[in-house]
Amino acid sequence: MKYLFFISLAILSNVGYAQGIKLNNALVITQFDKEEDRYAMQALMTDILKGYQIKALPLMNVLKQGEDPQHLLNDSIQQILLQKGFDTYLVVNVRGYDRNFKASEDTQTLAELLETTSIYQIYREEATSVSFEFSIYRGGQLISRQVLRCGNVSDRDSVLKRLRKRLPKKVIPVWIS
């Protein structure tokens, strides 16, 4: 019985350690169908992260408007970002609407994720909830992924308002611990 207790304690301490990622900087990348949704979400996420003293930069400040996010993988851009102190990438996209979703178990690299396109918008007509997926990459590899569901939404602005309210309570504590 004593051994079972110590084994359980060791497993739980490892699980707790794996969840904390100590996010201190992030380049915010958003994958949405509409350009205005991408910009609105980048601005919102940057604002929230800066409120927690996390150095944040939206993708729109790195690449030109309409430029392919794949250019982010160029060595010259990577060096500029490293000089500015950014080694972490936060990718935000919609996981789905009106259902409970789990975080994807696919362990895509950052390059593979940037190749994918999104057909989703921040809000879809007649949807009552939106689930967002947040993927964090360092060194091109996935280190964390969470899903946050925002319910009771009726339009694009209510989705952004819900996200601003729920993200600091549910997801940010995992990122900064």
Image (cartoon, grey):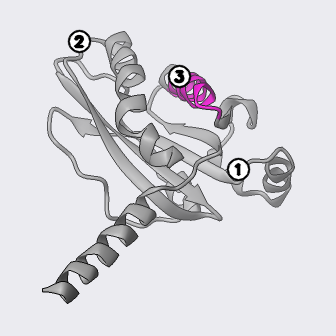
Picture disc at residue 44: 3
**Can you identify the residue that label 2 sits on?**
154
Q: Residue at x 47, y 52 (%)?
A: 116
Q: Residue at x 57, y 28 (%)?
A: 42
State the image coordinates of residue 112 (x, y, percent, origin top left): 52, 62
| Amino acid type at mark 3 | Leu
Q: Is residue 59 magenta?
A: no
State the image coordinates of residue 143 (x, y, percent, origin top left): 50, 62
**Can you identify the residue that label 1 sits on?**
72
Q: Residue at x 38, y 15 (%)?
A: 161
| Amino acid type at mark 1 | Leu
Q: Nearer the viewer, mark 1 or mark 3?
A: 3
Q: Which residues are magenta?
A: 38-53
Under circle 3, the secondary element is helix
Q: Is residue 74 left or right of residue 59?
A: right
State the image coordinates of residue 66 (x, y, percent, origin top left): 65, 32
